[in-house]
Image (cartoon, rainbow, N blue to C red):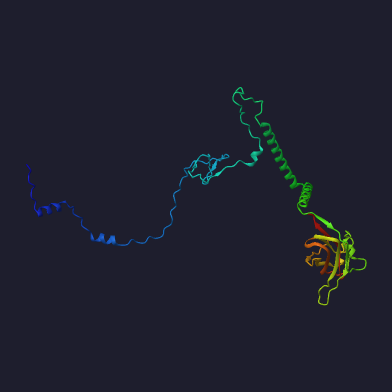
Amino acid sequence: ETLPLPVVSEEASRSRDAALIAPLPPVDPEEEEEGDREPDAVLPQAPQARPDRRDRRTARTNVIRPGDLICGSCGQGNAPARKFCTRCGFELREAQVARTPWWRGLLRRRQGPRVVELGTGSGQQDESAPAPGGRLTAFWNQVKVVLGITFCLSAMLYASYAPFRNVVNARAEEVRTSVSGFIKSQYSPVRPAKVTGPSAEGRGPGNLIDLNTSSYWSVPHPKESGGESQKTLLVVEFDRPVSLDQLIVTAGAGEAFTQHGRPRQMFLTFANESRTRVDLRDTAKPQTFPLKAGLATKKVTIEFTDVYPSDQGKDVAVAELEFFSLLS
């Protein structure tokens, strides 16, 4: 049989629920005011020294073999297969690989054990027989050692002994000149048939093409009333149409270089009416100038428009004019 549930009144239920609630402690008014108060400002204080941290890493070894991975944090050498440093745990993804010093390549390398084909040997290494290619390798190693020692001794002798240094420099200059002459373009001289123009007595224009720098051509070259130099013309003729690619001018009067004026500027007019300007330096050495407009010409007119003056004479002197054609 089912028993009926007991009937509880509403007031009894409320009394039972109120008994289950724990009472709150009384609130102190002073503590409530202290909780709402803002904290006081902190005055500046001297910084406290940090406690020393002990380095608990293992000691770094200085033996770094070729192929080792050098840690970028502590400098420890690690095996090539490692991913992290054995000393500090730093990642070795971008670590540098230790290389073999160059001077070790000059030393004789140790030969490994000889390898023989299966069934052709006794199983014992024959110390008297060299390994395959061993003689050639040993000879080459000896050559490298000799060359290295010779180079070091030559460098020391070159730096300390002046006569040896002068001989080496002279030989090097000869080699450089020969190589430069081989690389540069080759020119063939073109001899003019005649040269005409004004000249001083005994210094005719024929001296310009006689291949003798001790003789020279000269002509009076006074200045005009405005202070500008007068123009002097020379006409160079060839016996056939030629292509002129280079001009060498030896200015002045040889040993009497300062006693006569020297050309400063001149213009070359070819048979095709094209002109080339040539600016000269005031030197007795031959000066070389390229000619780009002298194609298939039979006559060249040279006009001297400016002169380096001389205190001893109002003239202009030229020792030699040489024309060249580029070899095809």
Quarter-of-image position of residue 112 = top right
Indicate the quadrant containing the C terminus: top left, top right, bottom left or bottom right. Answer: bottom right
Say whether residue 54 is left or right of residue 313. left
Indicate the quadrant containing the N terminus: top left, top right, bottom left or bottom right. Answer: top left
Quarter-of-image position of residue 61 = top right
Q: Residue at x 64, y 42 (%)?
A: 102
Is residue 51 depicted above or below 208 in this figure? above
Camera-side residue: 109 or 211?
211
Where is residue 161 drawn, in percent x and y? 77, 47
Say whether residue 199 is left or right of residue 14. right
Where is residue 268 drawn, in percent x and y? 81, 66
Say whether residue 14 is left or right of residue 119. left
Where is residue 235 drawn, in percent x and y? 86, 66
Camera-side residue: 295 or 199?
295
Q: Most extreme residue toward the right, as rendered?
A: 202
Instruction: Residue 285: tell me if it is visible.
Output: no
Instruction: Residue 209: tell me if it is visible.
Output: yes
Q: Residue at x 70, y 34 (%)?
A: 139
Is residue 171 depicted above or below 324 in this figure? above
Q: Most extreme residue toward the bottom, as rendered?
A: 225
Camera-side residue: 254 or 21?
254
Q: Residue at x 69, y 36 (%)?
A: 140
- Count of numbered marks: 0
Where is residue 30 drawn, in percent x and y? 25, 61
